[in-house]
Amino acid sequence: MESILIVEDNDSMRQMLAKTFQTEGFEVETAKNGTSALQAISHRKFDLVISDLKLTDMDGVEVLTSVKDLDTQTQVIVMTAYGSIETAVQAMKQGAFDFVTKPFDPEHLLVQVRKALQSRRLVTENTLLKEVLASNHQFQEIIGSSPKMKEAVSLIQKVAGSDTTVLLLGESGTGKELFARAIHHLSPRRDNPYIAINCAAIPRELLENELFGSEKGAFTGAYTKKLGKFELAEGGTIFLDEIGDLDISLQAKILRVLQERQIERLGGTKTINVDVRMIAASNIDLKEACDARQFRADLYYRLSVFPIRIPPLRERREDIPDLAEHFIKRYCQELNKPLQKLSPDALSLLEKYHWPGNVRELENTIERAVILCEGKKILPAHLAVRIPTTAEIRLREGAGLKEVGQHAQAEAERSLIVRVLEQTRGNKRKTADILKIDYTTLFDKMKRYQIEY
């Protein structure tokens, strides 16, 4: 129930207003002067204050100022006699929502009250929304409302506030680094460095230098001291992507960091303490790698304190429309092209495709489609994905020469029609002329081959 404080020194007016608003379902409290009003607002918050500008003990502007000092979201409506409109306008400059001139129609005041309370609700909702967006800024690229994605997001929200080591598991292209960044931005370390390094992309002899740094003269070409990623990430987070590809000798050094929070630079003898939270990721089964003696079991158990599995795209197909729309908006903006949309056939194709490259492959597919598409609608022809048709599957299982010929003819016709439609930018009459067929024949074939343009 929304609360209203009425500040009015006229007894009959104060009682009439209180009864009016109580009848409308509001919680009402009254004050007969400014002093009583200040006492009331010091003990509790009100959604709305209705105050006369001319009170026996003080100016109503003082009440307004005190209300706004305590809670800027509390709305204030001032009541004033006709000759004090200039003062009322001044009160609005001080933050009043509106003013009404005495004598007034209670119904008119009720309308203004509802508007003021609606404004307060909107301000409150906007503030809450900003807080949610601020706390969830790290999720802006994590798109998906499927149960498996919700579960993964819930896990990172739970673990982010601690210093627990996290192991992200998932196929290539599922977005493991996005999750690592999200964990960092949700953590108390968010204002300190976040450093990511791909263990599979750097040769072993260089990776050790990258991770731990080196002293001057440690090896040929080491003309100066170099700080490693662990030192650079001090106070923050280091993300070791594809840790399953880490050389076995480096695994021992990573284990030491986890156990003792210490490193040594190449060529150095001094032990350096580091305060770094570690997040690791792998696209291979580390347990199997341990069984094959390709990965240290002790390191695996240290890393897998809190494992999170990122699902492949084929296990969350319901997220494909939102992901595709997100990438379309991004690349239309980057390429300075009008906003495009997926045709129903194109979306159906994306939802049926198996996506071995996961979200990364979907992103690349959409980028290519945006470049190729000249109109406002992305068609299946613009997508670099293809699903075997039922006819093709049947042909693989064995078919006669006649059936093979019919299938080849249909594929050739469909391909030619799509190509000419692209050339004519969807002008069907011109397409029919180029193909030397009737306009109605073109429509029949487009319907038969499920061509949308």
Image (cartoon, rainbow, N blue to C red):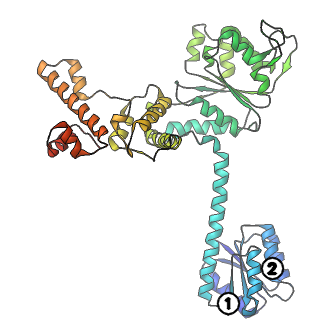
User: How many residues crowd around disc 1 within 10 Å: few (fewer than 14), some, or many (20 or more)?
Assistant: few
Farthest-out residue, left: 402
Classify 217 as above or below 41: above
Any part of residue 10 in sight: yes
- Residue ID at (65%, 91%): 104
| Residue 93 found in image quarter | bottom right
Q: Quadrant of the N terminus?
A: bottom right
The amino acid type, in three-letter code, at marker 1 is: Met
Q: Which mark is residue 74?
A: none
- Residue holding disc 2: 61
Question: In x, y percent, where is residue 152?
Answer: 57, 35
Classify 142 as above or below 385: below
Q: Nearer the viewer, mark 2 or mark 1?
A: 2
Task: Please tell me which residue lies in front, 373 or 386.
Answer: 373
- Residue ID at (85%, 11%): 268
Q: Secondary structure beneath disc 2?
A: helix
| Residue 167 found in image quarter | top right
- Residue holding disc 1: 16
Classify 184 as above or below 438: above
